[in-house]
Image (spheres, rainbow, N blue to C red):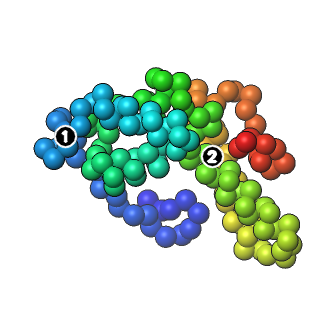
Amino acid sequence: MARMHSRKRGKSGSTKPIRKTPPSWIKYKPEEVKKLVLKYAKEGKSTSEIGLLLRDVYGISDVKSITNKKITKILEDNDLSKKIPEDLHNLIEKAIMISKHLEKNKNDKISKRGLQLNESKIKRLIKYYKKKGKLPKDWIYSRQTAELLLR
């Protein structure tokens, strides 16, 4: 299958093996892992940052194999999830950075194309999240209000 915005073929990713039991080197119990996730979420860390911290500092390679829940599900259950999903948030931040760059450099055609591609990804993600019910049906993205959305 081809990549989204190029004529190249995509990476043939592999799937992670399903684990029924947590790895033997992990000494943490499910309650302790949930407390760690909640602690870092209250500090303002994103879900990917929490996963990296748990992997690098605590040696917890996969939260789901221990708690049977993903990090996002743990945060949703405790009402700590963000209003905008993390991947959409990151794309909107990138669009803001590109548009600020374009204000200074009006003739940068490559960045204009990059902004178009980025915004098409944003629109596609919004459509998906509206279908899944994670965003309200009347939620609209616009370049002018993008910075206000992230605050």
- Mark 1 in CB contact with mark 2 (< 8 angstroms): no
Residue 114 occupies which quadrant of the picture?
A: bottom right
- What residue sits right under mark 2 in the picture? 89
What residue do we see at 81% from left, 68% from top? 102
Quarter of the rendering occupied by the N terminus: bottom left
Kind of residue indicated by mark 1: Lys
* Tag of residue 141: none
For the C terminus, the image quarter is top right
Q: In this view, does 105 lie above or below 145?
A: below
Inspect this view and state whether residue 105 appears.
yes
Does residue 120 show up?
no
Side of 73 relative to 80 (left or right): left
Number of residues whose C-alpha sits closer than 10 Å to that of mark 1, classed few (under 14), some (14–19) or many (20 or more)? few
Q: Which of 54 and 91 is in front in this view?
A: 54
Q: Where is residue 75 in the image (x, y as percent from the top left)?
A: 47, 30
Question: Does residue 78 sit above or below 44 in this rendering?
Answer: above
Percent position (x, y) of residue 100? 80, 63
- Mark 2: amino acid: His
- Nearer to us of marks 1 and 2 is 1
- Where in the figure is residue 4, as x and y percent of width and height? 55, 59
Question: Where residue 39 sits in the image (x, y, percent)?
Answer: 45, 36
Cα–Cα span, label 1 and label 2: 34 Å
User: Residue at (80%, 50%) from the top-left corner?
Assistant: 143
Residue that numbered label 1 is attached to = 27
Mark 1 element type = loop
**Residue toward you, 115 or 66:** 66
What SS does tag 2 mark? helix
- Rendered residue at 79%/75% (across/down): 108
| Residue farthest along the left direction in this orientation | 24
As drawn, 66 above or below 87: above
Which of the two discs, 1 and 2, labels the residue nearer the N terminus? Answer: 1
